Image (cartoon, rainbow, N blue to C red):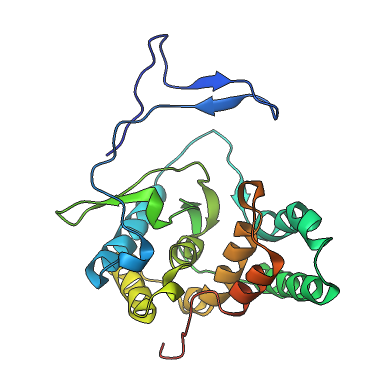
Amino acid sequence: MSYPIQRRSGGTLGTRPSSTGDRYHALFSWCPGRPIATKDLTLQQAAQLGVALARIHVASDSFVTTDSRYVLDERLLLERSLQQMRPALDLASPEDVDFIENCATEVANRLHVFDAGPGGWGIIHADPQTMNCHFTPEGAVNFFDFDHCGYGWRVYDIAYSLRHTNAVSTGEQIRAAVIEGYESVRSMSQAEHEMLVTIGQAAWIREGTAAGHGLPPKKLIRLLQDPYGPWNSW
């Protein structure tokens, strides 16, 4: 595991001023293992990734805190993202803007009536890409960078981890291995399976505004049309 290192002045959290206000920072120990790019995942590693995500979800079911944390619902994922994306959309073609906004509306409507079932909503990592975890030779997957951790649909973590699997020829098998590994710990409801593409679209819309650099509208459109790659064999 990775843990915060105490500062000489005491405590583990420091601050420094910036143009947007105080920025907080902490120094952590090295997380055991090494990063593996999505395109280089083996089927075994993909399954281990799913197992690790499910264990986070199951463990967090019993976590109790009085601290507040944001909620990754349709308002944050879509409405806020579109607001942050507005400068880029103002420069895009009307056709591209219509596609993105219409897709966001359809995704919001589906999320609004989405019932994930027991255990389908709770604390999630919210940024479980492979650069935020290390794989050990013994088969463990250690996640870090919980900056975006909050309350949301558990299937969002799965969808987010699958985003770049369409870049490899084995993408379909990798996606299946992640979900098989996940369900070896926590079973997904039928509704969660059916919402994977929709949640994947929501993840890309949020990614389209990430850290202020975002995605060009045309690239975002391509990803909204095909968030992962072929799903026809499922």
- Residue 138 vs residue 79: left or right? left
In this view, 44 is above or below 56: below
Please say whether residue 80 is visible from this viewpoint.
yes
Task: Please identify the quarter of the rendering in which residue 169 is found.
Answer: bottom left
Q: Is residue 43 left or right of residue 203?
A: left
Horizontal and vertical percent position of residue 162: 44, 68
Q: Position of residue 131 (x, y in %)?
A: 39, 52
Q: Residue at x 58, y 20 (%)?
A: 16
Q: Position of residue 85 (x, y in %)?
A: 74, 56
Between 47 and 164, the one lying in front of the other is: 164
* Residue 60 rendering spot, x and y as whole percentages: 40, 48
Q: Which residue sits furthest top?
A: 9
Taking the view exactly as shown, the residue that stands out farthest to the left is 138
Quarter of the figure that contains the C terminus? bottom left
- Residue found 77% across the figure and 70% down from its top: 101
Residue 69 position (above or below residue 103): above
Quarter where residue 43 is shown = bottom left
